[in-house]
């Protein structure tokens, strides 16, 4: 039934919002990128980072220029990315009279159309400190006989956070397939009650509450201690990832992170809403998922108000901000309450605790955001993208394209075919690879190489100053340990302090 309703929405979108004049015979133009104080649009390869860098398609005609902008604060890492990430400037969006050129249709296709993926999943159900359950779905190729990866494996782990509605989209499945072909161990994080995860407590995860994700990351570090950890979030799932990075700071255990089509100003996004067909479909999908828990949720919330709401804001308020609830939910792991105080739980108070950018100054790893100007879900780029954040914070990088829709970024067939050889392994790269997936994997590789080069340079400088011991003696290495100011020191940090004391006494 739900598939027929989605198909009806697609028909309505085609009949009502198909703007032929906007997509027929048009080309990408760099001057379409929004401009503002302190931002510039440059032609060519871009010898320095900062402002906007628009890449040219080898010709001199402005009408054939591809518009891709890297917006960031000038830094050594930014210059390194511009030099080594060729995928950032190798994007050819679909143009002409094709359904893939429509931002709306491409978004609906990526979110609803099934994808026959060769990837299978092995699930780990994690019991949390309050007896709740979340799940990690580890992606494995269908031809692999061993379903479990050894804990001694040094392969990097890619933690994937889907949208806040918990649906496995084509984007998530293709990302798992691409990551596997490049040697990563993909793991998809499922919130409470999402994707068949049992709801064992009367508590649902709030939009930007990272307590459950924090425990899942600790489990991943325990299971794969030798591999680096990277993170990718999709759509509204970026709110959870940004909240986690802000709250944990340098104790996030992650090397780098990427947000695909993120929603930054989430309170405004819930208040302003989407166009009615998209919002109606999302509200219906969330109601269907919550209907199986209607009886048990009735002990905490007013289910009549929940299932009678017709907007995303109404659903969020009914779940977490509704007055007249019975009892109170237990406190979360880090001493934080799992819900607002019922006597003072207003809409504004809820977003003071769940806005993704509330602790953005504490983020301590490189974060790349891949956005498109024609994103119909996020809205207008000028009012929904915090350009000032990327221009002032050295840890944040924005890759802005003039087209790409929401988690789509479908490029020309010849570009996708040429990119099929990018890191191919096992022949799986013969399938279609999204431009955004190639870009994020290059970002991970470049940041890792940059930090490795920086570490080697520091060690070389230390040897030159005589700290390395010219007679082949043991090198003294000081290990600094930093913990999140709101998170108690975990066992990982205790072991680090113990190892530092042993090396010092030697």
Image (spheres, rainbow, N blue to C red):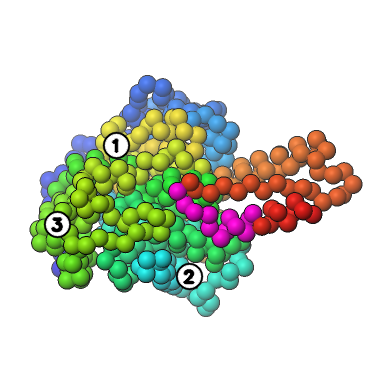
In what element is the residue under mark 2?
strand
Percent position of residue 236, x then y? 31, 50
Residue 50 percent coordinates (x, y):
48, 28
Residue 494 belongs to magenta span:
yes
Which residue is at 60% across, 48% downward?
A: 481
Q: Is residue 239 magenta?
A: no
Q: Mark 1 points at which residue?
A: 384
Please tell me the numbered disc located at residue 324. Answer: 3
Residue at 73% x, 47% y: name it. 477
Expressed as whole percent of the image width and height from the top left, the position of residue 197 reads 33, 70
Between residue 497 and residue 467, name the one nearer to us: 497
Residue 354: where, in percent of width, then height? 32, 47
Mark in front: 3 vs 1: 3
- Provide the secondary structure element on which disc 1 rests: helix
- Screen quadrant of the C terminus: bottom right
Q: Earlier in the sequence, mark 2 or mark 1?
A: 2
The stretch of residues the image draws in magenta is 486-497
N-terminal label among 3 and 1? 3
Give whichever of discs 3 and 2 has the lower sequence position.
2
Q: In this view, does 408 lie to the left or right of 319?
A: right
| Residue 202 seen by the camera | yes
Query: Can you identify the residue that label 2 sits on?
Result: 141
**Answer yes or no: do the residues labelled 3 and 1 have beta carbons within 8 Å?**
no
Q: How far apart are marks 2 and 1 (CA)?
A: 38 Å
């Amino acid at each position: 039934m739900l598939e027929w309703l989605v198909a009806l929405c697609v028909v309505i979108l085609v009949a009502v919002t198909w703007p032929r004049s906007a997509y027929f015979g048009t080309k990408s133009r760099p001057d379409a990128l929004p401009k503002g104080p302190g931002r510039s649009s440059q032609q060519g390869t871009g010898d320095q980072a900062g402002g906007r860098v628009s890449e040219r398609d080898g010709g001199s005609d402005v009408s054939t220029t591809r518009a891709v902008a890297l917006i960031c604060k000038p830094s050594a890492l930014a210059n390194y990315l511009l030099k080594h990430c060729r995928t950032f400037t190798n994007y050819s969006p679909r143009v002409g009279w094709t359904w893939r050129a429509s931002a709306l249709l491409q978004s609906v296709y990526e979110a609803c159309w099934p994808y026959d993926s060769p990837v299978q999943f092995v699930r780990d159900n994690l019991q949390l400190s309050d007896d709740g359950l979340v799940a990690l779905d580890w992606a494995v190729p269908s031809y692999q006989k061993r379903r479990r990866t050894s804990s001694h494996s040094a392969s990097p782990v890619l933690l994937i956070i889907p949208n806040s509605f918990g649906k496995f989209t084509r984007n998530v499945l293709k990302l798992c397939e691409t990551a596997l072909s490049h040697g990563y161990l993909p793991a998809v994080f499922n919130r409470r009650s999402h994707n068949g995860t049992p709801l064992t407590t009367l508590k649902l995860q709030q939009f930007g509450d990272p307590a459950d994700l924090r425990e899942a990351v600790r489990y991943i570090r325990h299971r794969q201690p030798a591999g680096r950890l990277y993170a990718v979030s999709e759509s509204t799932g970026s709110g959870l990832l940004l909240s986690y990075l802000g709250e944990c700071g340098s104790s996030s255990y992650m090397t780098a992170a990427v947000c695909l089509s993120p929603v930054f100003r989430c309170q405004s996004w819930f208040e302003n809403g989407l166009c009615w067909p998209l919002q109606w479909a999302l509200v219906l999908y969330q109601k269907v998922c919550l209907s199986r828990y209607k009886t048990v949720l009735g002990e905490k919330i007013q289910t009549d108000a929940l299932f009678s709401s017709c907007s995303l804001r109404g659903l969020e308020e009914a779940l977490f901000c509704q007055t007249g609830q019975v009892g109170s939910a237990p406190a979360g792991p880090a001493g934080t309450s799992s819900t607002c105080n019922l006597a003072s739980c207003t809409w504004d108070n809820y977003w003071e605790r769940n806005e993704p950018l509330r602790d953005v100054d504490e983020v301590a790893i490189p974060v790349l955001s891949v956005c498109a100007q024609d994103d119909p879900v996020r809205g207008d780029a000028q009012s929904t993208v915090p350009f000032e954040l990327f221009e002032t914070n050295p840890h944040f990088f924005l890759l802005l394209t003039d087209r790409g829709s929401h988690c789509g970024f479908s490029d020309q067939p010849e570009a996708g075919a040429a990119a099929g050889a990018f890191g191919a392994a096992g022949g799986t790269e013969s399938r279609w690879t999204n431009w955004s997936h190639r870009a994020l994997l290059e970002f991970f590789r470049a940041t890792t190489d940059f930090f490795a080069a920086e570490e080697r340079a520091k060690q070389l400088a230390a040897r030159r100053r005589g700290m390395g011991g010219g007679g082949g003696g043991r090198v003294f290495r000081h290990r600094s340990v930093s913990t999140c100011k709101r998170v108690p020191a975990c066992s990982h940090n205790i072991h680090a302090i113990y190892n530092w004391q042993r090396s010092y006494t030697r």
